[in-house]
Image (tube, rainbow, N blue to C red):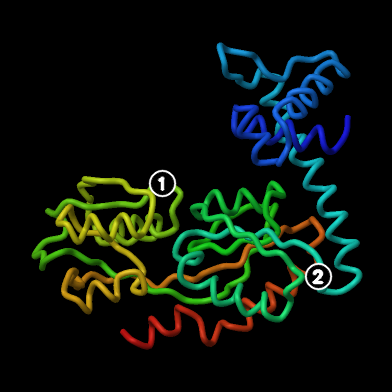
Amino acid sequence: MTLEQLRIFIAVAERQHVTEAARALNLTQSATSAAIAALEERHDVRLFDRVGRGIVLTDLGRSFLPEARTVVARAEEAVAFLAASTGLHHGRLRLVASQTVANYWLPPIMQSFHAAHPGIELTLRILNTHDAGSAVAEGEADLGFVEDEVSSPAFTLTPAAMDQLVLVASSPVADPGRAGWVFREKGSGTRAILEQALAAAGVTPRIEMVLPSNEAVRAAVEAGAGISALSRVVVEASLAAGRLVELPFPLPPRMFHAVRPTERHVSRAAQAFLNAALGTADLSLGKAILSST
């Protein structure tokens, strides 16, 4: 069993498609299929079932997938550790963040870090708060930045910046309890805070739509689909243009948190990025939002 075989197995398992996995890995389809066949033959197992022209993981394959990810992640950590010993000239940093953080707060920090350390390759995946925490816990990301508190012994949270949610609609609403609502998906930090605030106010929302992004929620609310809560920075242009109105409903400020693994080694690049992110706290998205309210 080789690391390359494990990487190929993970790519195929995640996509359930040999050709797409080969394209993602910049390999030929035959080389990808041969690696899977060699892995199965060497250990006398079946990791995939061939169903028609497609493939699906067997029960054993599904059980083996997290083990393979752990081994590959540990190997990448070892490479990152050695690369970090030479300074911040070379390396890779895998970031994951929830939507508001990724779209509005993190990009300027990434740009500043890249300007200071151009040899460090930065990648960013956007996931909801729950999935971002899981990605750090499972070694799929080096650092995470999320909009709500998530709890796991596998990672540690560090406060990074403040944000403020506001309740918005396309026109004034006399009684939010009687209105239709547009929600983010379960696992979203925005949704979790909104649900807590509604429960505290004794409001049972009638959910009309569940949408997967801030921008989709904003567009739906502008179109009159219902009311919702979003970060002020997401809706400030729409409020200024009159496409949305802010409703007088108390919503607590929320903290953006950095997420780092508790037990795994944190590379020098990851620590340097974390320091840069925390060092911007006084100029954060949240401070600008709170000072304008």
Tell me the residue at 60%/27% (across/down).
17
Q: Which mark is residue 91?
A: none
The image quarter in which residue 159 lies: bottom right
Cα separation, mark 1 vs mark 2, equals 34 Å
Residue 24 vs residue 177, the one in the foreground: 24
Q: Check disc 1 and report the residue beneath it.
A: 186
Give the answer, above or below, for where 140 lies relative to 147. Answer: above
Query: Which residue is nearer to you in this view: 176 or 146?
Result: 146
Compared with residue 277, is residue 210 higher up or lower down, i.e. above or below? Answer: above
User: Neighbour class for label 2 at 10 Å: few (<14), some, many (≥20)?
Assistant: many
Q: Amino acid at mark 1?
A: Lys
Residue plotted at (67% across, 75% down): 114
* Quadrant (top left, top right, bottom left, bottom right) of the C terminus: bottom left
Under circle 2, the secondary element is helix
Reading the image, the residue beneath label 2 is: 268
Residue 270 position in % (x across, y down): 73, 67
Which x, y percent locates residue 152?
Answer: 63, 52
